[in-house]
Image: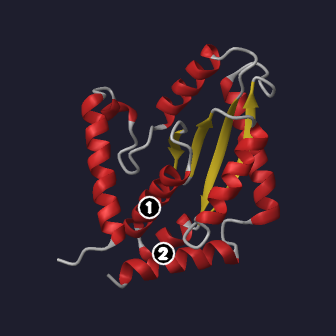
Amino acid sequence: MRYSISNLLQAVFKLCVRWWRGSNPKVGVLCDGLTFVMDRASILEVLDKACKDRRQENTLSIVFVDLCGLKAINDFHGHNYGDEYLRQFTQSLILHLRPDSRIGRIGGDEFIIIVELESEKTEKVMDRVQKEISGRFTFSFGVSEYPSDFTDSISNLVSLAEGRMRKSRNGLYSRLSPESIKAAKKFVSGLTKK
């Protein structure tokens, strides 16, 4: 059997998730079965609780992330490749983000990340992550901040971050931009060579 760094990292990641699930019995309900991060309901519940627990002087950033290239992979190579693309993207986020960041998949190729930093610092963190994984993945992101962007609900904070992501994507990437297609092709070619 041929082992690669990617296979080894994936095995270690799965063991860590199993250990985490074992020490957190409710996690089976809370985790997205494909990516092993929180599902939509769970990340929104965690965000709501974090905002309620937070004092006014402490800030919290909400990052809305949209992975580019997934549709092209699914359409041209099938959903098995698309699922692997999602898994590896999520693992890359986990490896490159701050340990106290919380990640949830809210559907398809969209994620929410909760970071205990001001939005300006969070944007710098996300820019760094984007650069570090740009050879394999492209993504757009938008950031909102609690309490400064808070109006009347958590869903408005998420919507604001999503709106900022869409605005940034128009300037940087589109769903089928040359950058996202190149990253997706590179990813698929790496899988087919194994």
Mark before the other along the chain sequence, 1 or 2: 1
* Residue extending farthest left: 1
In terms of depth relative to the viewer, which is nearer, 88 or 67? 88
Horizontally, is 129 left or right of 24 in the view? right
The amino acid beneath tag 2 is Phe
Q: Are marks 1 and 2 in contact (CB under 8 Å)?
A: yes
Which residue corresponds to the image point at 26% horizontal and 49% vertical from the top-left? 15
On screen, residue 56 above or below 98: above
Image position, residue 136 (x, y; %):
54, 71
Of the 4 image quadrants, the one containing the C terminus is bottom left
Image position, residue 190 (x, y; %):
42, 80
On screen, residue 19 above or below 108: above
Residue 108 showing in the rendered view: no
Horizontally, is 9 left or right of 148 in the view? left
Does dot 2 land on a helix, a strand or a loop?
helix
Q: How many marks?
A: 2
Image position, residue 184 (x, y; %):
54, 74
- Residue 193 appears in which quarter of the rendering? bottom left
For mark 1, what is the residue?
Answer: 88
- Residue 140 appears in which quarter of the rendering? bottom right
Which residue corresponds to the image point at 58% horizontal and 73% vertical from the top-left? 135
Horizontally, is 88 left or right of 123 in the view? left
For mark 2, what is the residue?
Answer: 187
Residue 142 showing in the rendered view: yes
Which residue corresponds to the image point at 59% horizontal and 22% vertical from the top-left? 50
Which residue corresponds to the image point at 73% horizontal and 66% vertical from the top-left? 173
Image position, residue 159 (x, y; %):
72, 36
- Residue 66 appears in which quarter of the rendering? bottom right
Does dot 1 land on a helix, a strand or a loop?
helix
